[in-house]
Image (cartoon, grey):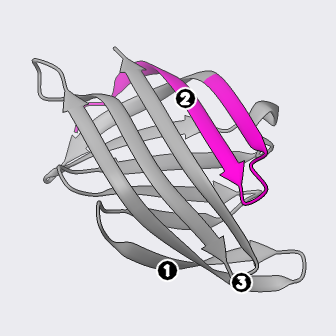
Amino acid sequence: MEKKKVWLSITGRTKNSEGEEDVIELVTPGEMYRKAHSDYIIYDETEVSGMKGTTTTLEIDKNKMSIIRLGSTNSHMTFEAGRKNFNTYPTPYGEMVMSIYTEKLAVDYDKEDLPMDIHVDYSVEIQGLMASANELNIHVKH
């Protein structure tokens, strides 16, 4: 299992039900490796994302991507085009149920068959209280 050093350019866009938009952009170093039929990208969150002290792992295969966060923030989100997945989301008031409906998941690979560009369009609903439309773009440079 050979780990490669990579640079990640991550842009997250969120629009809430009132139409207010929030954009987070992050450029950070990370590592990538392949295990079985999945690719893994690992990076440390920073103050920019509001999750300093958290390590994020992206687990990617052809039709599915998971974002696993461990540390100051713990969460596990799974994205599969056309599917709704449920996760628990920790808050200071206890855990809440979060549903993620993935409208689109596109993973473009380079000539070495490693993920280069990841695009996800998804909507999130937490306990039926809060809903948002989201877009996530990740560009990986070797």
- In the picture as drawn, the residue positioned furthest to the right comes out as 92
Image coordinates of residue 43 in percent, x first then y, are 54, 36
Which residue type does callout 1 highlight? Answer: Phe
Q: Nearest the camera: 141 or 117?
A: 117
Q: Quadrant of the N terminus?
A: top left
Which residue type does callout 3 highlight? Answer: Met
> Does label 2 or label 1 sit earlier along the sequence?
2
Q: From the viewer's perspective, is 119 left or right of 26? A: left
The verdict on residue 12 being magenta is yes
- Gap in Å between the C-alphas at discs 3 and 2? 26 Å
Residue that label 2 marks: 10
- Gap in Å between the C-alphas at discs 3 and 1? 10 Å
Tell me: residue 26, above or below residue 93.
above
Q: Nearest the camera: 91 or 46?
A: 91
Residue at image location 22% in from the left, 30% down from the top: 108
Residue at image location 82% in from the left, 85% down from the top: 94
Q: From the viewer's perspective, is 79 left or right of 9? A: left
Residue that label 1 marks: 86
- Res 120 quadrant in image: top left
Q: Tally the numbered discs.
A: 3
Residue at image location 75% in from the left, 39% down from the top: 22
Which residue type does callout 2 highlight? Answer: Ile
Q: Quadrant of the C terminus?
A: top left
Q: Residues at badges 3 and 2 in contact (C-beta under 8 Å)?
A: no
Q: Secondary structure at mark 3?
A: strand
- Res 131 quadrant in image: bottom right
- Gap in Å between the C-alphas at discs 2 and 1? 24 Å
Q: Is residue 52 visible?
A: no
Image coordinates of residue 74 in percent, x first then y, are 66, 65
Magenta residues, start to end: 1-26
Which dot marks residue 96?
Answer: 3
